[in-house]
Amino acid sequence: MTNSTASKSKKTEKLQCPICGSKKIQHDIRPLKLTYRNHSIVVNQPALWCDSCGEGVIEGADHKATREEFRTFRSKIDGSLSR
Ligand SMILES: [Zn+2]
């Protein structure tokens, strides 16, 4: 059966999870574990979090929010592991 409802690429006005397609997605700040060289840190990550699959979509501005923290964390590890 051919379904001819060619859904034109609408602009994503309604937020939708790119992983599972759920619309139960919201911008929120949640703890996220980041790992670097077997060390991990938990940061408060702003992102579009999906309530269905639990995945977070981190966009530019959200990424910036934790970038410095993660960078500091990495350099601390790099510093302590410097060979
Ligand atoms: Zn999802």
Image: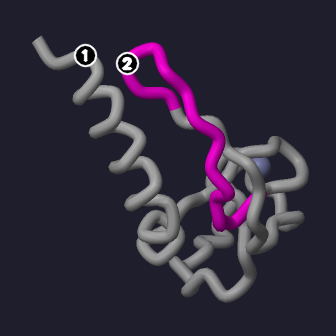
Q: Position of residue 10 (x, y in %)?
A: 57, 84
Residue 66 forms part of the magenta stretch? no
Q: Is there a contact, CB below 8 Å, between mark 2 and mark 1?
A: yes
Residue at far front of view: 80
Q: Which of the 4 quarters of the picture holds residue 15?
A: bottom right
Residue drawn where x is 61% and y is 81% of the image: 12
Q: Position of residue 6 (x, y in %)?
A: 59, 71
Given residues 27 and 7, the one toward you in this image is 27
On the rendered structure, is 42 left or right of 21?
left
- Residue for badge 2: 37
* Vertical position of residue 33 compared to residue 5: above or below: above
* Dot 2 amino acid type: Arg
Residue range in magenta is 35-49
Prevalent SS, magenta region? strand
Q: Residue 23, labelled with which disc?
A: none
Give the distance between the C-alpha atoms of the residues marked 2 and 1, in whole angstroms: 10 Å
On the rendered structure, is 41 left or right of 38?
right
- Residue for badge 1: 81
Give SS at disc 1. Answer: loop
Residue drawn where x is 40% and y is 59% of the image: 67
Does the residue tagged 1 have its C-beta within 8 Å of any atom of ligand 1? no
Given residues 7 and 49, the one toward you in this image is 49
Given residues 83 and 20, the one toward you in this image is 83
Residue 38 forms part of the magenta stretch? yes
Q: Position of residue 72 (x, y in %)?
A: 36, 49
Q: Position of residue 61 (x, y in %)?
A: 47, 77
